[in-house]
């Protein structure tokens, strides 16, 4: 099986758990995921099978869309509801819709984020969550992120008893964006502590949650039919963002034997292109300025 299987990851399991269980369900080893989801986050997790594991980097480069909720009035160690409360500030006068929208707008576009301590980012060979669990602190790297959309999707709810305010949102973001941190940064814009109180990834790598299947559904289908059918998306869907070039017989013979292709293959020159033969995706080529040629970047098949 070669292709992309969009999984609906339920809360309570890691992305690695999904891969581990799928290897047993599908009885195959060559499986990888594109984009880690925290255990308490549900949603789309693109899984690459077989030859399609070579497309993982392209899936990860694609943007992601999240829906969720943010609560103003307190902050935690993990920036979500799993952590210990480390700051509180009673919301006495609730923020208006316009105030919240203005704060969201200020975080749209190119921004710099500092990853949360409870994250998998490595510093000096150790993951940040290892430092956090050991009670240690370390300087965290600053990261560039692009927030294409960050919009309010509900009327804010003011809890008089808890003196907090919550609302839902949708965010369309680039690779490497920490949504938990986006929630915390929104609180900073409003000058109150805040936390991500719920999060779902509704799109990743170009695959929507409507087309994702749970592990239970996949296990049941394999038991009944022993195949994934149209649930397995073609490898080609992972590289749809690149221009496709159909090769003739002579060009295909050259590509099969590792021969680069001239700029005339596709002009104006593109950083990466997909080469097809008889309509089948064969390889991703990239422009090598030092060679003045398109050369192989990822090869999926030479048959």
Image (cartoon, rainbow, N blue to C red):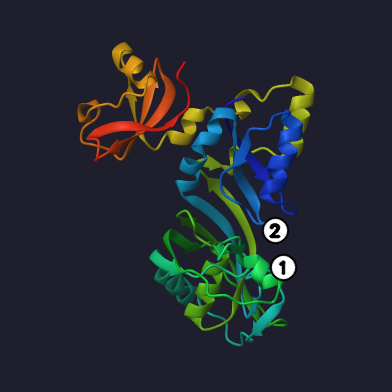
Helix, strand or loop at label 2? It is: loop
Residue 122, horizontal then vertical, whole percent:
56, 62
Helix, strand or loop at label 1? It is: loop
Residue at the farthest top position:
249
The tag on residue 18 is none
Horizontally, residue 230 falls left or right of residue 97, namely right
Quarter of the image for residue 155 reads bottom right
Q: Residue at x 32, y 23 (%)?
A: 259
Which residue carries the number 2 mark? 40
Count of labels in the image: 2
Quadrant containing the N terminus in the rendered view: top right
* Depth check, front residue: 82 or 49: 49
Quarter of the image for residue 81 reads bottom right
Horizontally, residue 45 falls left or right of residue 217, namely left
Q: Residue at x 70, y 51 (%)?
A: 14
* Depth check, front residue: 129 or 256: 256
Q: Is residue 210 above or below residue 177?
A: above
Residue 28, horizontal then vertical, whole percent:
69, 29
Task: Estimate the spatial distance between the alpha carbons at disc 2 and disc 1, rounded to whole Å.
Answer: 8 Å
N-terminal of the pair, mark 2 or mark 1, is 2
Tell me if residue 62 can be seen: no
Q: Is residue 196 above or below residue 172?
A: below
Residue 243, horizontal then vertical, whole percent:
33, 32
Tell me if residue 82 can be seen: yes
The tag on residue 82 is 1
Q: Residue at x 51, y 52 (%)?
A: 65
Residue 15, horizontal then vertical, whole percent:
66, 48
* Depth check, front residue: 94 or 277: 277
Quarter of the image for residue 127 reads bottom right
For label 2, the crowd category at 10 Å Cα-Cα, with few meaning under 14, some 14 to 19 and many 20 or more, is: some
């Amino acid at each position: 099986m070669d292709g992309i299987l969009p999984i609906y990851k339920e809360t309570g399991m890691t992305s690695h758990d999904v891969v581990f269980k799928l290897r047993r369900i599908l009885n195959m080893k060559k499986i990888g995921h594109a984009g880690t989801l925290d255990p308490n986050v549900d949603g789309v997790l693109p899984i690459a099978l077989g030859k399609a594991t070579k497309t993982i980097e392209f899936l990860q480069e694609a943007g992601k869309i999240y829906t969720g909720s943010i609560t103003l009035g307190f902050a935690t160690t993990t920036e979500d509801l799993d952590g210990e409360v480390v700051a509180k500030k009673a919301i006495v006068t609730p923020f208006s819709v316009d105030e919240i929208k203005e704060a969201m707008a200020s975080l749209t576009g190119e921004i710099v984020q500092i990853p949360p301590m409870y994250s998998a980012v490595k510093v000096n060979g150790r993951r940040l969550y290892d430092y956090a669990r050991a009670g240690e602190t370390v300087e965290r790297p600053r990261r560039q992120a692009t927030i294409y959309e960050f919009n309010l999707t509900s009327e804010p709810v003011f809890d008089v008893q808890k003196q907090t305010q919550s609302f839902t949102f949708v965010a369309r973001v680039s690779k490497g964006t920490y949504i938990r941190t986006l929630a915390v940064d929104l609180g900073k814009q409003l000058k109150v502590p805040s936390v991500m109180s719920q999060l779902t990834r509704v799109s990743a790598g170009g695959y929507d949650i409507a087309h994702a299947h749970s592990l239970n559904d996949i296990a049941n289908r394999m038991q009944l039919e022993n195949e994934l059918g149209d649930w397995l998306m073609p490898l080609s869907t992972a590289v749809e963002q690149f221009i496709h070039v159909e090769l003739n017989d002579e060009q295909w013979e050259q590509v099969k034997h590792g021969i680069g292709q001239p700029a005339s293959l596709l002009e104006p020159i593109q950083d990466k292109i997909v080469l097809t033969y008889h309509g089948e995706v064969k390889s991703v080529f990239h422009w090598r300025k030092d060679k003045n040629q398109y050369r192989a970047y990822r090869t999926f098949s030479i048959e």
